[in-house]
Image: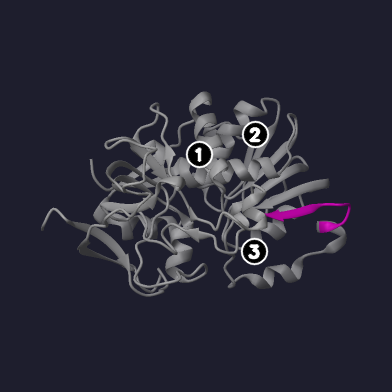
Amino acid sequence: MNKEDMKAMVLYEITDLHKNRFPLRSVELQAPEPKDNELVVRVLTCGVCHTDIDVIEGRTPPTRLPVIPGHQVVGVVEKRGRNATRFKKGEQIGIAWINSSCGTCFFCQNGEENLCDRFRATGRDADGGYAEYIAVSEDFTYRIPVVFSAAEAAPLLCAGAIGYRSLRLTKMHDGDALGLVGFGASGHIVLKLVRHLYPTSRVFVFSRTEAERVFARELGASWAGNFEDPCPEKLDRAIDTTPAWGPIVSVLKNVAKGGRLIINAIRKETDDKHALLSLDYSRDLWMEKEIKSVANLTRLDVEEFLQLAAALHIRPEVQEYEFEEANTALLDLKERRIRGAKVLRVSY
């Protein structure tokens, strides 16, 4: 293999992970070269996210195929375009879901670039971090605080940052009761955040798997039960991170008057949409309960969260996989074999 080449895990077609357990093919490609304000980054680690599964299975389909997935990327600057000046060669940086936006529309001009019509996502609209090298505009990269290892930093770039955005959107106050619906990479980081930022609040975790419920209690959850279980306390705020509709219908029964539910999911699977038929307006939505979705991330979300996580000494629990095990990591995530966040070791 020439030094200009690289290994990559590539998606060639939309597919169901339960029907095709190896959706990504290991191939050798020519490594990218940087354009004017771009960096070429040698990838150290890349987080494995449920949104990667949404890309692969077509719920948030890529705008082109083939494509290299992966949007929680940590690496070192290998090459710089002639106008790229923010980082020196060898510096460790991060790349997140937001790959670019137009910069000129109403949303971009008002700090809401996540809503831009020309929003492009890393690993969906542009090649991502399941590869030894990645090219990216230096304007959409982040300095990684030195307190984090490359494996620890990867899930902070999406699971952590989107969890931070979701928590802000709840408008939570200290003392509020918070429900976490689903307890994967994002949920366990939010629980750590809440214990620092809202020390008198109680966190109640809803999860289908006993392993996740045990993990939640270990991290300080006041209670952990199944989605259908009645919560011992009415919830002032709740964050849903599941890919399904059923858990939302179940948790709304536990939301207090004037409570707010944040849906942190880029798409919902349709095989359980019949669950919505059991929604009861008087019981589940009346009394000024609110539901709000989270859409993507802004660069400010990522930057603020990285600094906050460093200051509060928040570190995710990480399960590491070898680069060639990307398909295994995705299937483990799909089948809820989760404890914290999953990360690919690409190179060191």
- Kind of residue at disc 2: Ser
Decide if residue 342 is in sight here: yes
Q: Nearer the viewer, residue 232 or 83?
A: 83
Determine whether 327 is above or below 89 in the image. Answer: below
Q: Residue 204: x and y, percent? A: 66, 40
Q: Which residue is mark 1?
A: 215
Residue at coordinates 27% horizontally, 37% vertically from top-left? 89
Whether the residues at callouts 3 and 2 have beta carbons within 8 Å, the answer is no
Determine whether 252 is above or below 165 in the image. Answer: below
Q: Nearer the viewer, residue 185 or 284?
A: 185
Instruction: Name the quadrant of the C terminus.
Output: top left
Q: Residue 92: x and y, percent? A: 33, 36
- Kind of residue at disc 3: Trp
Crowdedness of circle 2 by 10 Å Cα count: few (<14), some, many (20+)? some
Q: Under tag 3, what secondary structure?
A: loop
Q: Under tag 1, what secondary structure?
A: helix
Please tell me whether mark 3 or mark 1 is closer to you in this view: 3
- Name the N-terminal-most of marks 3 and 1: 1
**Which labelled disc corresponds to residue 222?**
2
Q: Residue 280: x and y, percent? A: 82, 64
